[in-house]
Image: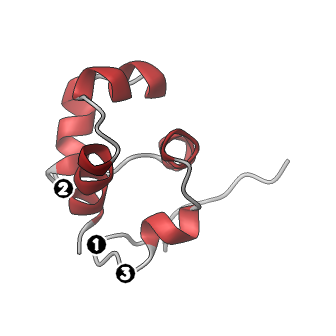
């Protein structure tokens, strides 16, 4: 399963509209549409907001996702 498919399924199961998700995550509906169609991937910050919004752990969100690679990502430690 791709991340986009998982995000779309989460939104549908939680009965959320693109409008409500975009407002809560402070991103455009276009961005969410691109995420859900796998034309773009959310940033780490957006992934964390998505997890908070849908009340899901990051591990669960990314579990069995085929198209996410964090190999070149640099994480900031506070």
Mark 1 burial class by Cα count in 10 Å: few <14, some 14-19, many 20+:
few
**Residue in front for this viewpoint, 12 or 23:** 12
Residue 64, label in figure: 3
Give the image location of residue 27, x and y in percent.
37, 25
Residue drawn at point x = 29 percent, y = 22 percent: 28
Residue drawn at point x = 24 percent, y = 28 percent: 18
Give the image location of residue 51, x and y in percent.
53, 49
CB contact under 8 Å: marks 2 and 1: yes
Residue 55, label in figure: none
Mark toward the viewer: 3 or 1: 3
Residue 50 horizontal side relative to residue 57, left or right: left
Residue matched to label 2: 38
Give the image location of residue 76, x and y in percent.
72, 51
Label 2: state its secondary structure. Answer: loop
The answer to whether any part of residue 40 appears in the image is no
Mark 3 burial class by Cα count in 10 Å: few <14, some 14-19, many 20+:
few
Residue matched to label 1: 67
């Amino acid at each position: 399963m791709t991340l986009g498919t998982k995000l779309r399924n989460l939104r549908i199961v939680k009965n959320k509209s693109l409008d409500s998700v975009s407002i809560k995550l402070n991103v455009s509906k276009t961005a969410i549409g691109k995420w859900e169609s796998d034309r773009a991937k959310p940033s780490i910050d957006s992934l964390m907001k998505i997890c908070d919004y849908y009340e899901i752990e990051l591990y669960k969100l990314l579990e069995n996702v085929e198209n996410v690679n964090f190999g070149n990502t640099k994480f900031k430690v506070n």
